[in-house]
Image: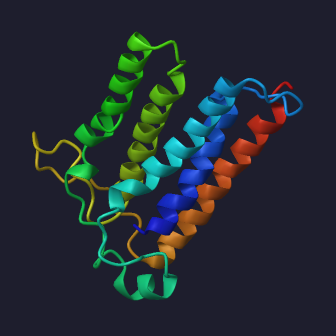
Amino acid sequence: MTLKTHFETGIGLALLISGIGGPTINAMDISDVSKIGILAAILIGVTAGSVYPDIDLDESNLNSEDVILNWESNFDHRGIVHTLINVIGVSLPFLLMAWIVNRVTTFDTTWIAVLGLSMSVGCLKHMLEDTFTPKGILWLYPFSMNRFRIPLIRNYATERIFRILVTGSLLYGAIYYWSTNPY
Ligand SMILES: [Zn+2]
């Protein structure tokens, strides 16, 4: 699956999650920096977590002209960053840092922990999406070499439909929750 799809659905999920679980910020009073930090951590964390598993790509796959020809061949190596261990592991350094800084200083480190957990959520979404491609995902590597896959997305055309439907649904939900937030 292409970075474009992971990125766009990532933004959709980030907005939805921050709309459901994010802190409500009064636009007239932005003095509560910790709330802004947590909101930013969700938005950045989920979006970054959605795209970073494919950072080792050889060439940009944001160019849709190339993608149509090379769909799934020149990118998406799907190594250790596409495993359940990585989903858990990516947040551990953040949780550890939040805990240590919290022990030795008086800083509010909630946003650091939220950033790490949001990255895990984004990464999990990335892998769910890749599961729908023929290559599938080695979810349980190294414990199992089973390639889990539900190969519904077989070319760039179906991926495009997937991207529009999923991003659209996520944004629809996001708008609902953001607009019903009590301010
Ligand atoms: Zn991937």
Q: Does 89 sit left or right of 51 as displayed?
A: left
Q: Is residue 105 shown above or below 119?
A: above
Residue at the outermost front position: 105
For the point 40% across and 64% down, the residue is 152
> Total marks drawn?
0
| Residue depicted at x 78% and y 25% | 31
The spot of residue 45 in percent (x, y) is 50, 42
Name the side, left or right, on which 161 lies relative to 120: right
> From what the image shows, is residue 124 above or below residue 3?
above
Which percent across, then down, holds residue 110?
52, 22
Horizontal arrangement in the rendering, residue 65 relative to residue 97 (left or right): right
Q: What residue is rendered at 65% in x and 44% in y?
A: 15
12 relative to 164, above or below:
above
Q: Position of residue 49 (x, y in %)?
A: 43, 47
Locate the N terminus and report the quarter of the image it occupies.
bottom left
- Which image quadrant for residue 164? bottom right
Q: Quadrant of residue 155?
A: bottom left
Front-lying residue, 37 or 164? 37
Q: Give 80 or 55, whichever is nearer the viewer.
A: 55
